[in-house]
Amino acid sequence: MTVMFCSVLCIYAKSIKVDPKRMSLPRCRNVLGQELLELVEAHPGGLPVINVVKELRLSAMETVELVNQSQQLEKKLLQSQCLSCPLFESHFEQEQKRRRLSEELRKLQHQLSEESLASMPDYRSHVLALEKLGYVEPSGTLTLKGRVARSLSSHEVMLTELLLQESLLTLGAAEVAGLFSCFVYEHRCKDEVVIPLSMKAAVEKFVEVACKIGHVQRESGFDEPAQQFVEQFSFGLCNVVYHWARGMHFAHIMELTEVQEGIIVRCIQRLDELLKDVKTAAGIVGNPELRTKMEEASRLIRRDIVFAASLYLQ
């Protein structure tokens, strides 16, 4: 058996001979237990420990000093009043947890420090892309686009670009819901995607904006190809969500697609959360019409079986 040095607290001057081959026998284990008990009872003040410096023949001054410090700390610890506290174990666990969290906080703060971030290639690429797209000034100051993006919790850049495009204003609330479904539906479609006629122009504009962002990111040093950024958005539920927002019954909705019922429900629930986020961002843009449209889109999809808590838990 190998014992790590850090696992050894001390070495006692007393020892008991043990035959490892016989330790599997219950009788031998009982005898060993009895011998240990007698040894402990014979030394009520604690078993004597060896002189580490002498027995191990330690000669390095630094090592000897560390041993002395360890012994002094042990004496100080044994004299501490906290050992007599009836809640010592729970208090000790709380202190351990506090120290562990404090260390994790210190590491995170270092990772988020300017010095740490500035040394990361990915960080520099992101900053350069945000500058090119107009989200931050060269001085690091946030622009209006930057403040809008900061208010969003996912797909910040793509959503901000769409919010500042006039094309959204030409769409109805149902079309907006259908278009934004691509942010929450992550599955790739094997069959040809059906796009409602009233949304084709908006989808084409969406892809155009995504291509622009993808190319800027690539030029800024991103490893991700521009087309890969575009392909992350799937319009596989666009037709389904559009018709759901227009009031179609769920049973008829299931006839439009082969996507599983549970996936559709969860995507519409996530879409509602996204629309609430975008509504807040539209307020920062200062566009009350767009804010109202997001609110209306959210209202249209929040109905019937999709939001029945007894059937589907969010």
Image (cartoon, rainbow, N blue to C red):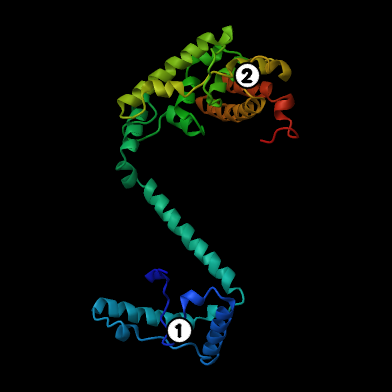
Reading the image, the residue beneath label 1 is 17
Identified at 47% across, 13% down, the residue is 205
Q: Is residue 94 above or below residue 113?
A: below
Q: Position of residue 210 (x, y in %)?
A: 43, 20
Identified at 74% across, 30% down, the residue is 308
Mark yes or no: residue 259 visible: yes
Q: CA distance from mark 2 to mark 1?
A: 73 Å
Q: Position of residue 282 (x, y in %)?
A: 54, 25
Total numbered badges shown on the rendered structure? 2
Reading the image, the residue beneath label 2 is 258
Q: Describe residue 160's horizontal placement relative to residue 111 as left or right.
A: right
Query: Dot 1 surroundings within 10 Å: few (below 14), some, or many (20 or more)?
Result: few
Q: Quadrant of residue 240?
A: top right
Q: Quadrant of the C terminus?
A: top right
Tell me which amino acid carries mark 2: Glu
Q: Describe residue 56's horizontal placement relative to residue 195 as left or right.
A: left
Tell me which amino acid carries mark 1: Lys
Q: Position of residue 218 (x, y in %)?
A: 33, 25
Q: Is residue 29 above or below residue 105?
A: below
Q: Position of residue 78 (x, y in %)?
A: 48, 82
Q: Nearer the viewer, mark 2 or mark 1?
A: 1
Residue that extends furthest to the top in the rendered view of this protein: 197
**For the residue labelled by badge 1, is the local secondary structure a helix, a strand or a loop?**
loop
Residue that extends furthest to the left in the rendered view of this protein: 60
Q: Quadrant of the N terminus?
A: bottom left
Q: Which is nearer the N-term, disc 2 or disc 1?
A: 1
Query: Dot 2 surroundings within 10 Å: few (below 14), some, or many (20 or more)?
Result: few
60, 170: nearer the viewer: 60
Q: Quadrant of residue 118?
A: top left
263, 282: nearer the viewer: 263
Mark yes or no: residue 248 visible: no
